[in-house]
Image (cartoon, helix red, strand yellow):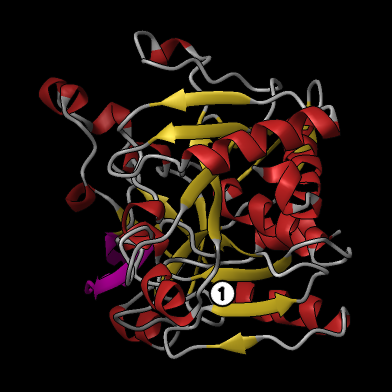
């Protein structure tokens, strides 16, 4: 199953090779010709029946770690890559480098901690990766400084139409766009799978300059706020209630015409949608709107609990709703869209 592969593959920001290779194979199997730029973004165009051209964007990368040092005992120190909470990574299995060397993240056991230590936040300096090596030389024979480290997690269905795993914020929108490429649509679609979204959105910048679409729609995970830790948030985003139209993010406001078009497409496809106004998540739309004379941008979010953790959770109904909405939107003619 494509989803299983997408979620399992390592793809830490700056090393999206495995995910990119899978995407390239899927695109080529559809008879389309993808292009890869110098940063590693994948861009593919599928002509439509009308002059309207839409750029659809999903990022390939996930949060992770990078090997920084190896100590005399063969234990590995690391730096973080992207916005992650290290306490969620303690005692988790990881894969290191291109050879996917297995390891576990270790920390001092609680019965050895002093009272003050138990109250402290878990920090990077108190953690290490154990690959079962007995010495520095042995460890250096398997991993090197600069190797990327990703979670070793298999995705799986559970509960009432829920799905859990790592990197759902990127890999499920990728699934949606690959499925969209299989169909024939009114609009021409340019689909971009971008790199390094989680370390500043670097990949989206050259993609923006390399295309001249009428509209840009970014697909990404958006924080579901239906758990106790989100009390007081401005917008309520609930799993199972549909994909979310982000009206306002940190620095970008959705184009009104795009918003109207998405809402009309949702009605046509009989898809429930949510909307949100907030300024806590950082998206590629922040700067894609500023290219050249400006771009019309919007964001369609997939609600996700526990973002950037080993156990991110989404609802299958929201993903299927996102797919149906996308199909209806890119199939609308310009008069329907207005």
Q: Which of the 4 quarters of the picture holds residue 261?
A: top right
Q: Is mark 1 on a helix, strand or loop?
A: loop
Q: Give the range drawn in magenta.
A: 65-80
- The answer to whether one can see residue 315 in this image is no
Q: Is residue 266 left or right of residue 74?
A: right
Any magenta on residue 76? yes
Q: Residue 111 placed where, x, y %?
A: 30, 27
- The one nearer the camera, 227 or 206, is 206
Seen at 32% across and 48% down, the residue is 83
Q: In which quarter of the image is the N terminus?
A: bottom right
Secondary structure mostly taken by the magenta-highlighted segment of the chain: strand
Q: In which quarter of the image is the C terminus?
A: top right
Q: Which of the 4 quarters of the picture holds residue 291?
A: bottom left
The residue at which mark 1 appears reads as 100
**In the displayed image of the protein, which residue is found farthest to the left?**
116
157 w.r.t. 83: above or below: above
Q: Residue 138 placed where, x, y %?
A: 39, 83
Seen at 69% across and 67% down, the residue is 189
- The one nearer the camera, 101 or 153, is 153
Seen at 52% across and 74% down, the residue is 16
10 Å crowding of disc 1: few (<14), some (14-19), many (20+) = some
Q: In this view, does 163 lie to the left or right of 300?
A: right
- The answer to whether one can see residue 2 in this image is yes
Q: Residue 140 placed where, x, y %?
A: 35, 85
Any magenta on residue 41? no
2 w.r.t. 144: above or below: above
94 w.r.t. 157: above or below: below
């Amino acid at each position: 199953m494509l989803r299983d592969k997408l979620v399992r593959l390592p793809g830490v920001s700056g090393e999206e090779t495995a995910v990119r290779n899978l995407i390239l194979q899927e695109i080529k199997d559809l008879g389309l010709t993808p292009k890869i730029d110098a940063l590693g973004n994948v861009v593919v165009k599928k002509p439509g029946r009308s002059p309207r051209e839409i750029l659809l964007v999903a990022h390939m990368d996930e949060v992770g770690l990078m090997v920084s040092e190896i100590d005399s005992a063969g234990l590995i120190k690391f730096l973080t890559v992207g916005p992650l909470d290290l306490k969620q990574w303690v005692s988790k299995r990881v894969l290191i480098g291109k050879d996917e060397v297995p390891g576990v993240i270790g920390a001092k056991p609680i019965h050895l901690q002093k009272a003050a230590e138990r109250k402290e936040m878990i920090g990077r300096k108190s953690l290490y990766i154990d690959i079962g090596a007995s010495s520095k030389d042995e460890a250096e024979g398997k991993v090197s400084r600069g190797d990327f480290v990703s979670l070793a997690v298999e995705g799986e269905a559970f509960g009432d139409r829920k799905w859990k795993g790592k990197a759902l914020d990127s890999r499920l929108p990728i699934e949606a766009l690959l499925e969209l490429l299989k169909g024939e649509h009114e609009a021409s679609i340019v689909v971009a799978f971008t790199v390094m979204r989680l370390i500043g959105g670097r990949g989206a910048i050259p993609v923006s300059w390399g295309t001249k679409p009428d509209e840009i729609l970014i697909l990404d995970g958006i924080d579901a706020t239906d758990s106790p830790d989100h009390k007081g948030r401005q917008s309520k985003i609930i799993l199972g209630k549909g994909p979310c139209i982000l009206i306002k993010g940190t620095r970008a406001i959705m184009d009104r015409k795009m918003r109207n078009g998405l809402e009309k497409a949702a009605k046509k496809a009989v898809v429930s949608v949510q909307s949100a106004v907030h300024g806590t998540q950082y998206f590629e739309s922040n700067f894609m709107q500023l290219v050249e004379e400006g771009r019309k941008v919007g964001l369609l979010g997939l609600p996700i609990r526990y973002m950037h953790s080993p156990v991110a959770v989404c609802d299958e109904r929201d993903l299927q709703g996102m797919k149906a909405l996308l199909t209806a939107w890119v199939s609308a003619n310009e008069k329907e869209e207005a």
